[in-house]
Amino acid sequence: MVGSINVDLIAHVRRHPRPGETLHGSGGQTLPGGKGANQAVAAARLGGTVAMVGAIGTDAHASVGLSGLQAAGVDLSQVREVEGPTGLAIVTVAQDGENSIVVIPGANSSMDAGRVSAAGEMISRAAIVVCQGEIPRSGIEALPSLITGRFLHNPAPVMELDPAVLRASDPLVVNEHEAALVLAQLRPGAGSGASMPDAPDEIIRALRGAGIASVVLTLGAQGSLVADEDGVHRVPAAHIDAVDTTGAGDAFIGALAMGLARGDALLAAARLASRVGAFAATGPGAQPSYPGIGDPLPELDDPAGPAGADHALGARRTSTPG
């Protein structure tokens, strides 16, 4: 796992404030977070052997940021301490479970090409390498030349990247907004001429047509779409009563990496990921809400599904999502 390590500062409110408005809230606790750390913890709790490549600061938040990774048994030998603050995410959670987040990078800003390349030996040994958009561009762009396994790329937030890096994704995992931004980078000038697709199935086909080997397009309560050489398939969501959606998308990606690492086809891994992401939304916070081996997962809308698609979580360890 190559990515961010943050501390989440959580505030609960009845609804999100309007511009210029002050609301009373509750909470104020700090929890381990960051997209990279969240995804690493999710994969490790499901039985994956996971290593983290990242950075923490020299402040008091560092121990909180590492606590979930340590508890999940993630290899931290490539997590470096840098002078300054640990990454911080200010998370506001409304009564309906929806959240808004402000991210302050802190030590994550040090994850440039030099730092990522320094972990090249570990990265090259990983069966699955997962990266997000919460580290500098140069660090992300250094990855394809180091990876010998599969590159699971979650460009969130989306930034300008070398198109070759985007095309190295296998799979690319994006929501609808992120998918449109990535497609605009792969089809420069399309916005001023040819129209951009807006239907999810059209978007995912366009991303495949732009040279990406496989794509998972997440659609929130509508589930997700999966596209690879076998075609485009819909993965349903699981019906749940959401408590807090913070980190649910990261749980999805960690589970997806875990499924691919143990040899699942992309569609089967996405079905597992949909159930794990739904589980995460039923509990507060990000990492504390993630399931472990033996936890019962919500069923998808079509629990029978494709033959062999849903695998029970076993106790065996798997190849490393790096």
Image: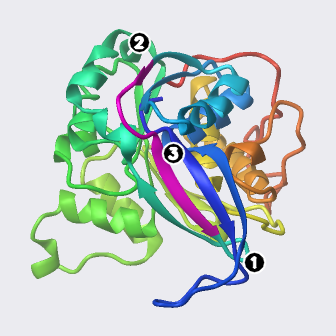
Asked if residue 128 is positioned above or below residue 137 in the image, the reply reads: above
Span highlighted in magenta in the image: 79-92
Q: Is residue 231 visible?
A: no
In the rendered image, which quarter is residue 150 located in? top left
Specify which label sits upstream in the sequence, 3 or 1: 3
Secondary structure type for disc 2: helix
**What is the three-letter code of the residue carrying label 3?**
Lys
Q: Residues within 10 Å of mark 3 (few under 14, many from 20)?
A: many
Q: Which mark is residue 95?
A: 1
Specify which label sits upstream in the sequence, 2 or 1: 1
Q: Residue at x 20, y 57 (%)?
A: 186
Q: Are marks 3 and 1 in contact (CB under 8 Å)?
A: no
Q: Which residue is mark 2?
A: 122
Q: Is residue 219 found inside the magenta-colored segment of the image?
A: no
Magenta segment, prevailing SS (helix, strand or loop): strand
Q: Residue at x 37, y 50 (%)?
A: 155
**What is the three-letter code of the residue carrying label 1?**
Gln
Asked if residue 107 is positioned above or below residue 79 in the image, the reply reads: below
Q: Is residue 81 found inside the magenta-colored segment of the image?
A: yes
Q: Are marks 2 and 3 in contact (CB under 8 Å)?
A: no
In the rendered image, which quarter is residue 312 located in? top right
Q: Which mark is residue 35?
A: 3
Report the colour scheme: rainbow
Distance from disc 3 to disc 1, alpha carbons, whole Å, reads 23 Å
Q: Residue at x 45, y 44 (%)?
A: 87
Q: In the image, residue 140 lies at what x, y percent?
A: 28, 37
Distance from disc 2 to disc 3, alpha carbons, whole Å, reads 20 Å
Q: Residues within 10 Å of mark 1 (few under 14, many from 20)?
A: some
Secondary structure type for disc 1: loop
**What is the three-letter code of the residue carrying label 2?**
Met
